[in-house]
Amino acid sequence: MNIPLTPIRFLRYAREQFPNRTGVVCGAERFTYAQFAGRAARLAGALIAAGATRGDRVAFLSTNCHRLLEAYYGVPEAGCVLLPLNIRLSAHELGFVLNDAQAKLLFLEQQFLPLVEAFRQAVPSIETFFVLDGQPRASWLVTQNYEDLLATSAPFQCDFMEVDEDSLTELFYTSGTSDRPKGVMLTHRNVYLHALSIIAAHQTNPTTMGLSSFDSVTLHTIPLFHANGWGAAHTITLVGGTHVMIHHFNPVEVFRLIERERVRTCCLVPTMATALIHSPERHKFDLSSLQAINIGGAASSPTLVREVEEKLGCACFSGYGLTETSPALTISPMKPGLSWQGEKRYAGAAMTGFAIPGVELRVVDANGNDVLHDGTTIGEVVARGDVVMEGYWGQPEATHAALQGGWFHTGDVATIDQDNYVQIVDRKKDIIVSGGENISSLEVEKALAAHPSVYEAIVIPVPDQKWGEVPKALVVLKPGSQATETELLEFCRSRLSHYKCPHSIEFFDSLPKTGTGKLLKRDLRKKYWTAQKSPVS
């Protein structure tokens, strides 16, 4: 018997098995799984009544809230494609994404009305605009807000036996750091099997079991508009856990919700983890419910893992993935049979990790051959599995290039050891080539992060007449801490080969970040290369 693999089944299952369990907490509102499922069904009915047809793209411009979570199920229930939008994009960038996707409906939070007003006339494909919160006052908005719309809509549930599991269900746009943004096409099958792979991965290791179990209470610290929300919208629903929503990342609000809701797990990018462990408010809250924190989205470090475990009192491990892979590919807890002790355990937990079930991972050289599993030889990470995207929306050439040879080429440079743990060295474009030597900016950043005064650090290449380019460190110090350029340079030289160390260090009060908390190397890199365009005297 073949039943279509679709995430629609997850909420159906949770409604049937856990109808009275609290499924969603959002501010002062709480919904059981029966209520959550009912609202998603009414959203599906409202979309159909609004003229949405199979395959139409339905966009949401929203912070993390129960309405966006409901869209993860209500939109595919109506046969449509969910398009979550990055709330940090400019009007021009949003206009590009919506035009490229040819979105038909747009739901937006009231705070984004001026932003949408700035581009809406340039996106003719959007037929209807709905406001998610508050009362619609602009003439171009539907006169009912989201809650009124649900209250007056008949619930709709599709026959999921008629769903094509290979059809598109979610569309996420990459950041477009080196090119125009690409729409990553995730199918029903991708999303369904990604959730099962994540659950299986966590259940095989005692350190991570709390991330996908019935009594899990998960705080959505990662924006749901980013990389499939790291899959949490699906995994937590399937196991009947509790989704705790937070509109914007704020350390005090994170601590408050952990204490109030007895949160057991959350996912963080490194900048979020750094903000939590250094928050002066941390000691005022009871964080004893925390069991595990997953750090991803950017490279972690042994120092950060140790500080998270010591100061937040829970297990900490890393993971790796991309929007194109739904997104998770690896996790880094210690495998059975290994015996990491002391600093080695922190170093292991900070690694990129090993492939989750359903994923095959290789590190290959320029000719596509596997590199030695020695933890030293570098190559590109390639992957294949159920979680890999269908392709890029409307970009067949880019799709072919990314999926050549039947493997997804990540563009990440890494090593792999004898235990099949991968360690990302850098993005291809972030490798610093100085005097013919390859320098990993991540390796230098980890060395700097180990200094007790360093809060954040990134390493970028800057022009150099002799070596072509050399590493430069941009550093933010911890509040109340002091360190000089000479001190940090000597600290690096005591840990790294001298050719890898920064040639200079510049101090900043803060560093620019993306909407998901990643440090924006590309923006800072431009400043130093632009300054060198004039002839050197």
Image (cartoon, rainbow, N blue to C red):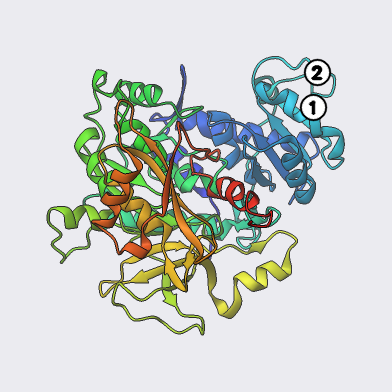
Q: Quadrant of the C terminus?
A: bottom right
Is residue 419 something that shows in the picture?
Answer: yes
Of circles 2 and 1, which is in front? Answer: 1
In three-dimensional space, the C-alpha distance between marks 2 and 1, rounded to whole angstroms, equals 9 Å
Q: Are marks 2 and 1 in contact (CB under 8 Å)?
A: yes
- Give the labeled residue for mark 1: 117
Q: Is 204 rendered above or below residue 96? A: below
- Give the labeled residue for mark 2: 138
- The three-letter amino acid code for the residue at tag 2 is Ala
- The three-letter amino acid code for the residue at tag 1 is Glu
Image position, residue 5 (x, y; %): 53, 59
- Residue drawn 47% across the image and 74% down it: 436
Q: Is 536 rendered above or below residue 369? A: above
Question: Is residue 381 found left or right of 94 in the rendered image?
Answer: left
- To which quarter of the image does residue 134 belong? top right
- Residue drawn 46% across the image and 30% down it: 249
Image position, residue 533 (x, y; %): 67, 55
| Front residue of 346 and 72 | 346
Q: Secondary structure at mark 1?
A: helix
Image position, residue 274 (x, y; %): 35, 37
- To which quarter of the image does residue 406 belong? bottom right
- Residue drawn 66% across the image and 44% down it: 83
Question: Is residue 471 found left or right of 263 in the rendered image?
Answer: right
